[in-house]
Amino acid sequence: MPRTLLLIGTRKGAFFLESDDRKTWELRGPFCEGWPVYHVIHDPTSGIVYAAAASEWHGQAVWRSADLGENWTHSSEGIEYDAETGRKISKVSTLAVSDGRLLVGVEAPGIFESRDEGDTWSLLSTLAGQPGSDKWDDPANQPPGHLGISALMFDRGDADRFWAIVQGVGVFETTDYAQSWSPRNRGLRADWPREHEEVGFCVHKLVRSPVDGDRMYQQNHVGMHRSDDAGRTWTEITEGLPTEFGFAAATHPQDRDTFYVIPLDPGHGRTMPEGHVAVWRTRNAGSSWQRLDSGLPQRDAYVGVLREAMAVDSEDAPGLYFGTSTGQVFASTDEGDTWTQIADYIPPISSVEVAAID
Amino acid sequence: MADVHLPSTLGPLFPGLPRQLDVQAATVRDVIDHLEREWPGMRDRLCEPGPILRRHIHVYVNRERAKIDTPVAEQCRVDVIAAISGG
């Protein structure tokens, strides 16, 4: 088995958890000088780790380590909007890498790319002209306090194709590397008035089955949804879950019908219902759901899990991992049936990703 | 030469950066341009596009709060402060 590396973004820096057997874990960090880190990824091709971070004092940057955390550099060269547009950047939120193309999504909505492993950046797209873009382009609606690109997801075989989530607006797909975009929100529910037919949805998390590219799932502000045509249409699958709200979601690496989600109370607290920590699993594409809580705190545990804070590895017996708003990391190596706490007392967790290191 | 003092938060970001250095400068902008030449990327850590000073980066010239175009006279003391913020 390769070494398993968990890459953890927190409110106070990045951390790594490493294991040779997924039973005994070693914590390393904090990295990135204690900056708030929103997303940490590992590029399996280059072996480089990237971290999207934004300091209240020193602004946003993408950090890079080519030696698994021993040494770090940072750059934001080119991650800026032309001052004349009135658009501002408050943070770099999310990262994706494929075929030598490193993307970072920012707030206010925009996507910057780097072709030199994060040394320099250039603006790739602001999704200009898409329905809703008049709002995020308005100089009066600039961050902090307004919306951004919260997630980017590359196609596995075609680096010209990827999906972007614009917070509070919806999912968009490009098949020509951001030259053009299409909204992919048909069939989603929204419990509020919308100005445009195809957007105005609050998509929290989008995931795609590794074994069936047409199968997607999303956790929405108002419900779980499934797509069987790569996001062109969506069907709600919330029934059977304790709440319709949540952020994190993960797909099974081998089974297109198995999928994991962590429901949260939908009010401003956004913690586990009744203080009972649980992951919910479907094995039939959302027709029914099973609560998985063996080994998890089952009372007085008012913890949240954010959109990027659950990950699944690709081992034959898949490992699942999630990090909490109160600084714990939990792991399961039996598809969620039982859980073990593998870290505690780290800062509030924004993201968890997993990598296999040979 | 201006007597420039930098915050401790910058040191880990730019290896070799001293806490104090002497800079030939006519304005705060010149000080930042000098720092950018010597430690590429420094401007982004201190300024937003414009450039203007970042919200929580405060600069004082001879103990008076300064902006990016504030003059810096010979023998001035320039303090760059990462202002108290957050928790």
Image: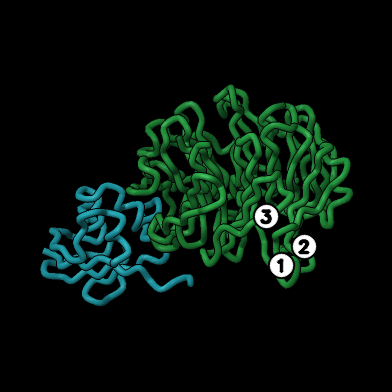
Chain colours: A green, B cyan
The quadrant where residue A295 appears: bottom right
Q: Nearer the viewer, mark 2 or mark 3?
A: 3
- State how far apart marks 3 and 1 are (Cα): 24 Å
Identify which residue is drawn at 29% across, 53% down. B42
Q: Nearer the viewer, residue A125 or A58?
A: A58
Identify which residue is drawn at 75% across, 57% down. A293
Q: Is residue B34 above or below residue A270?
A: above
Mark positioned earlier in the residue sequence (3 or 1) = 1
* Coordinates of residue B82 in the picture (x, y in percent): 35, 68
Q: Are marks 1 and 2 on the same chain?
A: yes
Looking at the rendered structure, the secondary structure element under dot 3 is loop
- Judged left or right of residue A119, residue A204 is right
Mark positioned earlier in the residue sequence (2 or 3) = 2
Disc 1 + disc 2, Cβ < 8 Å: yes
Q: Which mark is residue A339?
A: 3
Mark 2 closeness class: few <14, some 14–19, many ≥20 residues within 10 Å: some
Q: Are marks 3 and 1 on the same chain?
A: yes
Mark 2 sits on what residue?
Answer: A265
The quadrant where residue A237 appears: top right
Identify which residue is drawn at 24% across, 54% down. B15
Looking at the rendered structure, the secondary structure element under dot 1 is loop
Q: Is residue A340 above or below residue A230?
A: below
- State how far apart marks 2 and 3 are (Cα): 22 Å
Q: What is the three-letter code of the residue carrying label 3?
A: Trp
Tag 3 subunit: A
Q: Nearer the viewer, mark 3 or mark 1?
A: 3
Mark 1 sits on what residue?
Answer: A269
- State how far apart marks 1 and 2 are (Cα): 7 Å
Residue A134 visible: no
Image quadrant in which the C terminus of chain A is located? top left
Identify which residue is drawn at 13% across, 58% down. B24
- Judged left or right of residue A72, residue A107 is right
